[in-house]
Each structure stands twice: as structure tokens, then as C-alpha cells.
Image: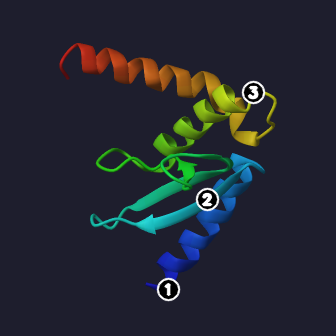
Amino acid sequence: MVDMVASRSARERKAGVEAGPLATVKIDVGADQQFVYKVSCTVCTAKGDRAWSTYRPGEDNGYMAAMDRWIFHLKEKHPDADAPCLVYLPEAQQRLHERRVARESGA
């Protein structure tokens, strides 16, 4: 379990750097023993006074899914923000398109 903690903290730091200065990143371990990424915005709020977050109960909250949601949040709410992850916007848009096509075809 110590290796998992070290790995989790290292992943948390790396994801935080990728997400940029408007983000805080926390990684939990889900019931399926997989990492659950929670990227929160230091500026925006959601319900009540809680920070806006990429976490979606019952959905994919792995690294790619969380970062894609974060990238879209940055582009929509903070268009002038600068974060390393923004270089992956085209790939995030492609994944979103593929998910929509799959959903529409009943897959």
C-alpha cells in the first residue's frame, strides 16, 4: 500500500502541474481500487459554495476523462487561462466526438 500512496502523490503532483494554476488536484482510490481524479477550480463554484470539480458520480473519473472535462472547463470559463493541458484540446474534442457518436449509435 505504501507504493500506491507514493504513486498516488506523484500522480497528483504531475496532474496538478498539467492542469495549471487554476486547479487543485486530488486523487482518491475508488471502490474498484482504481484512481479517481478530482480536478477542482480555484475560482468557480458549483452547488452551494463547493468548488466546481471534474468529478462525476457514476462516470469515468480516470485521468483522461477528468483532464478532458478540465480542459473544456478552462476553454469555456477561463479562455485566457494558460495551462499545459490545453495543448491536448484537439484530442479531448476528438474523444468527446467519439463518445457522442457511440452514444447515438447505441453502443
Horizontally, residue 98 falls left or right of residue 41, namely left
User: What residue does disc 3 label?
Assistant: 79
Q: CA separation, marks 1 and 2?
A: 20 Å
Of the 4 image quadrants, the one containing the C terminus is top left
Residue plotted at (26% across, 21% down)? 103
Give the answer, above or below, for where 14 lies relative to 58: below
Tell which tag, 1 or 2, sits nearer the viewer. Answer: 2
Mark toward the start of the polypeptide (1 vs 2): 1
Which label number is shown at residue 60?
A: none
Q: CA distance from mark 3 to mark 2?
A: 20 Å
Kind of residue indicated by mark 2: Val
Front residue (pair 42, 102): 42
Is disc 1 in contact with disc 2, using a CB cutoff of under 8 Å?
Answer: no
Q: How many marks?
A: 3
Residue 80 rendering spot, x and y as whole percentages: 81, 29
Which is in the foreground here, disc 1 or disc 3? 3
Which circle's residue, 3 or 2, is located before the other in the chain? 2
| Residue wearing tag 1 | 2
Q: Which mark is residue 25?
A: 2
